[in-house]
Image (cartoon, helix red, strand yellow):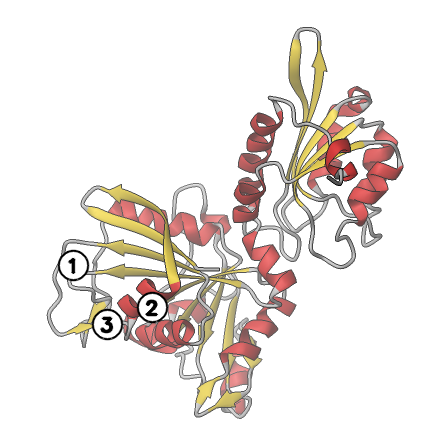
Amino acid sequence: MAIDEAACSRPIPTPYDRRFMAAAIRLSRKHLGRTQTNPSVGAIIVRDESSGPYIIGRGVTEIGGRPHAETIALQEAGPLARGATLYVTLEPCSHYGRTPPCANAIINAGISKVVIAVTDPDERVSGRGVLMLRDAGITVETGILEAEAADLLSGYLSRVIKKRPEVLLKLALSENGMIGRHGSGQVAISNNVSRAQTHIMRAEHDAIMVGIGTVLADDPVLDCRLSGMEDRSPIRIIVDRQLRIPLDSKLVKSAARVPVWLVCDPNARKDQQEALVKAGCKVIPVPIVNSKIDLAPMLELLATYGIGSLMVEGGAQLAHSLLDAGFVDRLALFRGEIVLDNGIAVAGLEHYISNDFASSRSAQYLEDRFIEYKRKS
């Protein structure tokens, strides 16, 4: 029987590895949606002495993407980092960008062991960070709480691997499966607790998207309005082929405060394009197929702009188009008790759920039922 030498030499995780990696994962959530093209990574440095292990440094990728989590944690730990263990949710970078590689900083700080949850699929890293650390004599473990960490890194991983954002489709459904009522504008389906959860989702995504029909019917703001989290509003993206959005809409009037991007036909009215740009909006022309925005190049283009996590809130046509094209990675459904007559439904929603998705978690928010689904692999 052949012996797997790599497996035999692989370090055995300590009882503390899962505990401290879980803490690093919780820390990484702090800046979700705020680190631009970089992912929100958590890092914790731990010393293990006779009295037991204790944390000497913490770091999470800073707002805007710099500095990285490892750098912040090392600065906090200072000289105590020598001989300590670093827990980090994503493989440390090994390439020179705007800052030197984190792998170099870890080596120079004298860290003796690095525990990594997820290896980085970015071709500039992709195992090179691990190799640099091991070549320097540092013990490296990978895959500790990998699934849990990857869940929070999913937007970044999608942008790197699939070359498009991870798409979460959030819908508030009535008891009879409607998302609204024809001719009634915005209809309250969810309760206040569910709506607060929606605002938390907004805060943790890079961007939020709706179709122009929703804008014309509801004149929404699409920001985060939870107390103390107002500065965490995501980029607001409107799929508006003909640029019908009114210049006096709440979205356009607030574009200077929170970015508004408009996806449109390249041949949309030039005067309207100019007026919207003057108002502070970003206009993004995308190819048209069968009189509709071509979703694939739209998503690919958003990824090049640094959008990794995209939350879609409506309307019915946009939701159906994304589901039908297979671009929805997660479904977040809030089901209320209200029954809507003359209702608006997302065509084929139940069919897509039963065939393409599996339930991943659920909750009860007063009378509202919440279920999140993930696309089956």
Q: Nearer the viewer, residue 166 or 77?
A: 166
How far apart are labels 2 and 3 at the CA level? 13 Å
Which numbered disc, 2 or 3, marks the residue that appears first in the sequence?
3
The quadrant in which residue 131 appears is top right
Report the mark closest to the observer, 2 or 3: 2
Residue at 73% in and 39% down:
1
Up/down of 205 relative to 143, above or below: below
Disc 2 marks a residue whose amino acid type is Tyr
Instruction: Name the disc covering residue 345, or none.
Output: 3
> For the view shown, which residue lies furthest in the top direction?
51
- Secondary structure beneath dot 2 equals helix
Q: Is residue 350 left or right of residue 67?
A: left
Mark 1 / mark 2, whichever is N-terminal: 1
Labels 1 and 3: the sequence-earlier one: 1
Instruction: Measuring from the top left, give residue 221's x and y in whole percent.
Output: 38, 63
Label 1 belongs to which residue?
A: 175
Q: As displayed, is residue 131 above or below residue 36?
A: above
* 105 up-or-down from 189: above or below: above
Name the residue located 28 percent from the left edge and 75 percent from the top edge.
347
Distance, label 1 to label 2, CA atoms, is 18 Å
Q: As drawn, is 334 to the left or to the right of 56?
A: left
Q: Which mark is residue 352?
A: 2
> In this rendering, is residue 23 above or below 351?
above
Q: Nearer the viewer, mark 1 or mark 2?
A: 2
Q: Secondary structure at mark 3?
A: loop
